[in-house]
Amino acid sequence: MSSAKWPTVKAGTVAAVCAATVAVSALPAAAAGFPGDGPLVAGDAPATSSAARLDRPGVQVRSAPDVDEPPDVSALSWMVTDADDGRVLAAKDAHRELPPASTLKTLFAVTVLPKFGQETVHTVSEDDLSDISPGSSLVGIQEDHRYTVADLWRGVFLSSGSDAVRTLAAMNGGWETTLDDMRAMADRLGARDTDVESADGYDTPGQHSSAYDLTIFAKAGLTNQDFARFASTQEAQFPESGGPDSFGIQNTNRLLVGSHGVEPYPGLIGVKNGYTSQAGNTLVAAARHDGRTLLVTVMNPQSGKNNAVYEEARSLLDWGFDAAPDIEPVAILPDRVGPQPPASPEPDADRPASHEPAADRADRRRATDRAAVLRAAALGHDAGQPDGSGPGVWWFLATGAVLVTGSTVVVLRRRRS
């Protein structure tokens, strides 16, 4: 029999297990740190941690020598982001849930645009144009006329046409199928604050988004060449093929085309503007200078000034281009642009529409957020710990301690017998 005493073995086992427990319990505390006060966490953590800098109210920005504070604008919510690497340079109430108006068409485009070739021709039916909400903006699609998919997307991006959205949604399998596809895409991209109830952004009970989510949608969209091309198109013929029924359309984004007293912004790419009575004016704008692309999202300016949404976006873009080389980000957007899901099947009249209640979707997102926090922490994605001794190491040590303890107990038991 070994000279080791069994009480000593039991004491050692208890101590080791306690140490492992302490190490594991330290994980949530490490994951819950404020990125704005300490090391910046990359990947999922800024998007999902309940203590993340962007979850705080008010303006969030890191001060830096020779960098001015962001301009004082009246929008209820806004965000300035480097579209190339996802660095959030500054934001105000980024996760505030607000009606998005037509800026929600960015999510519609990210979801549906890759599913059809641009030269595909579609003959518009009466059903395609049914149920358009009164007062919606229209590009002027006519029943029984033939349009290419590219024509329809120009109707979406330039004229914000709900008739073009309805037609594309019908091609995608129907309105409810398209809403479900958009919800799934929002989840895939890491959106936290979006509930989709109308694909064209029309004011609908329960529908909302945020500056954070709209920025994510635009960032994903700009990786698609067709999205970027349509978003930056200033003028077009509708339909492009011409003919007696063709007419010219102009992009309603005043910062892009320069109209209604707004000077065009140099290097502007687009992306989408919107207005409804509940949302007020909203705008997602991207511009490129000296090899850098910035995204600015502005939601519902309160100043009452004419063209406020465009001029506030202009001032935020100017600040962003000046600050970007020298300022540290307050967060980094999750990079979740993966393979496109398969195209939606044709609608099945016998299949009931799937419509997950908004409360259930919110609960599911919160559960996903918590899981993502733990994943990010367990992988040690803490950019502020150069030695790599992040929470992932704690998991490794804790697991090792338990395994070593178990092995020791087995060996000593065998020796004892």
Image (cartoon, helix red, strand yellow):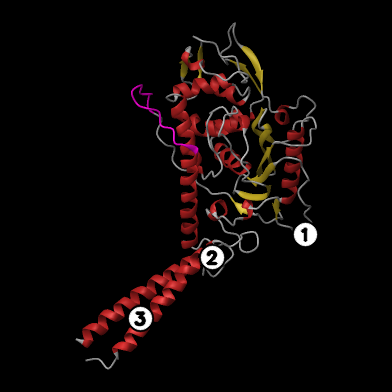
Q: Amino acid at mark 1?
A: Pro
The foreground one among 401 and 11 is: 11
Q: Which residue is mark 2?
A: 30
Structural distance between the alpha carbons of marks 3 and 2: 26 Å
Quadrant hosting residue 260: top right
Q: Amino acid at mark 2?
A: Ala
- As helix, strand or loop, the secondary structure at mark 3 comes to helix
Q: Which residue is mark 1?
A: 65
Expressed as whole percent of the image width and height from the top left, the position of residue 355 reads 44, 33
Q: Earlier in the sequence, mark 2 or mark 1?
A: 2
Q: Which residue is mark 3?
A: 13
The foreground one among 38 and 208 is: 208
Q: Earlier in the sequence, mark 3 or mark 2?
A: 3
Q: Amino acid at mark 3?
A: Thr
The foreground one among 366 and 329 is: 366
- As helix, strand or loop, the secondary structure at mark 2 comes to helix
Toward the bottom, the furthest residue is 3
Would you say the residues marked 3 and 1 are in contact, meaning their CB atoms lie under 8 Å apart? no
The foreground one among 312 and 150 is: 312
